[in-house]
Amino acid sequence: MIEELEQHYGYLFEEELLHEINQVGTFKEVPEGYRLMDIGEYIKSMPLLVSGVIKILREDDNGDELLLYFLERGDTCAMTLNCCVGTKKSEIRAIAETPAKLIMVPVQKMEEWMRKYHSWRNFILQSYHARLKEMLETIDTIAFMKMDERLLKHLRDKAMVKNDEVITTTHQEIAHDLHTSRVVISRLLKTLENEGKIELGRNSIKVIDL
Amino acid sequence: MIEELEQHYGYLFEEELLHEINQVGTFKEVPEGYRLMDIGEYIKSMPLLVSGVIKILREDDNGDELLLYFLERGDTCAMTLNCCVGTKKSEIRAIAETPAKLIMVPVQKMEEWMRKYHSWRNFILQSYHARLKEMLETIDTIAFMKMDERLLKHLRDKAMVKNDEVITTTHQEIAHDLHTSRVVISRLLKTLENEGKIELGRNSIKVIDL
DNA sequence: GAGCTTGTGTAACATTTGTTACATAAGGGT
DNA sequence: ACCCTTATGTAACAAATGTTACACAAGCTC
């Protein structure tokens, strides 16, 4: 595991902290679609994302879902950070959007490292900062944008994190992520295609002007 | 200032930290409607709210507004916390919803106290936690609820923080907070009144079943 | 190729929300 | 009392989004 650590977090953390992480952390490799965390589950460890993309979802009481944001390499889940202060249950669902590699660190170390390592404190604060900004962006999106704009943004975001202009997905899945119906998505996608912004195929969407 | 501090933060912070806050902090008292912070403004100090209610707003490029949440006594603004790590410009607007008293602490102390005081670390993490939860609730509200539900929730929230079942406001102001039009609010309010959930007056709304 | 499942296209309609326009009321100032 | 500003009520219509229903196509299995 030490190589993965050095490679992706070496520039962030002190030698000593890297050593500690290496000692108590466990390496985890998950396939696409793997559910890393679900709403109401107890959080026992926090993930440091080494590679891959994780999508973070919110669900209401009726089972309606909404995509909050994507996590990429170097990110950690801020909701997990809360474990050591407030509720220990997850408020969100985390699904591997691509195959992913993670280092899982026991949450008990959080506070100890906060005291000992300047770089860890910074990392945690940075993470909170990043997550709050992403939440703000999510709010902007759902509060101020109409569905066609949200859809196009979603496609671009997805193409971005996957690093591929061709997205492999179904209209149904997009509808879930954006919390609307499949018919609405099909309709809007067709419009976007007519406008020359995307090209539609079965199980695939090519985003033209990224 | 020391009495205010003792009274509202005494149970939270160590004696020594209280002393430091008292030394470097400045006391601030603002009237209702006072704009404490605006989007794009530079953040030089973080507020510890002693009394009153602050409303936190988001605005998009077109000047459309949306109420994010209310801050109450004992809260601080998590967006301010970011100042010492990321951007130094505010992402949000903060308006005094009631007359309010605050202690303003220079942001430079943040990191120093994070190192020195266990209670400060906890306070900061707790604040982030609370803010993230509030952001999630805001997202739930705008993503999953229809306007009539949002409106009723808003009225109840407002009655709650103001500690008064009679809300003094205009339809126009509510429309701004919920990012919709005055006509829509008037319409829905009238429906709520017919359902016996509220009583309407000029410049006032009485919430029946809190 | 027949039969199945899954994904997509589209029409017709319902509901929700937003917009425009105007009437009227409430209260303040003179 | 009269004028003015601000707040509210309501109708009529427009636009966006959600729902239901169904046709058909693509790919898979047998």
Image (cartoon, coloured by chain):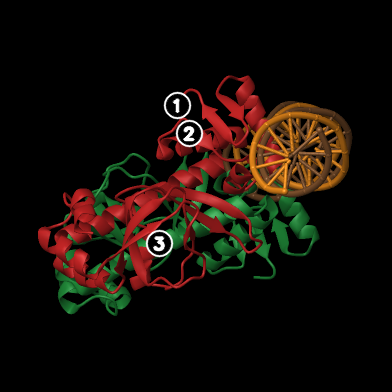
Chain colours: A green, B red, C orange, D brown
- Expressed as whole percent of the image width and height from the top left, the position of residue A84 reads 22, 51
Q: Which residue is mark 3?
A: B79
Q: Which residue is mark 2?
A: B156
Identify which residue is drawn at 29% across, 72% down. Answer: A4
Which corner quadrant holds the N terminus of chain A? bottom left
Is disc 1 in contact with disc 2, using a CB cutoff of under 8 Å? yes
Quadrant hosting residue B88: bottom left
- Mark 3 vs mark 1, foreground winner is 1
Q: Which mark is residue B149?
A: none
Chain name for mark 3: B
- Expressed as whole percent of the image width and height from the top left, the position of residue B97 reads 46, 48
Q: Is residue A65 visible?
A: yes
Q: Which residue is mark 1?
A: B210
- Expressed as whole percent of the image width and height from the top left, the position of residue B155 reads 52, 35
Is disc 2 in contact with disc 3, using a CB cutoff of under 8 Å? no
Chain name for mark 1: B
In this view, the residue in front, A170 or B133, is B133
Sort mark 1 into few (<14), some (14-19) or many (20+) by Cα contacts within 10 Å.
Answer: some
Question: Mark 3 or mark 1, which has the lower sequence index?
Answer: 3
The span from disc 2 to disc 3 (Cα, nearest Å) is: 25 Å
Q: Amino acid at mark 2?
A: Arg
Question: Mark 2 or mark 3, which has the lower sequence index?
Answer: 3
- Mark 2 vs mark 3, foreground winner is 2
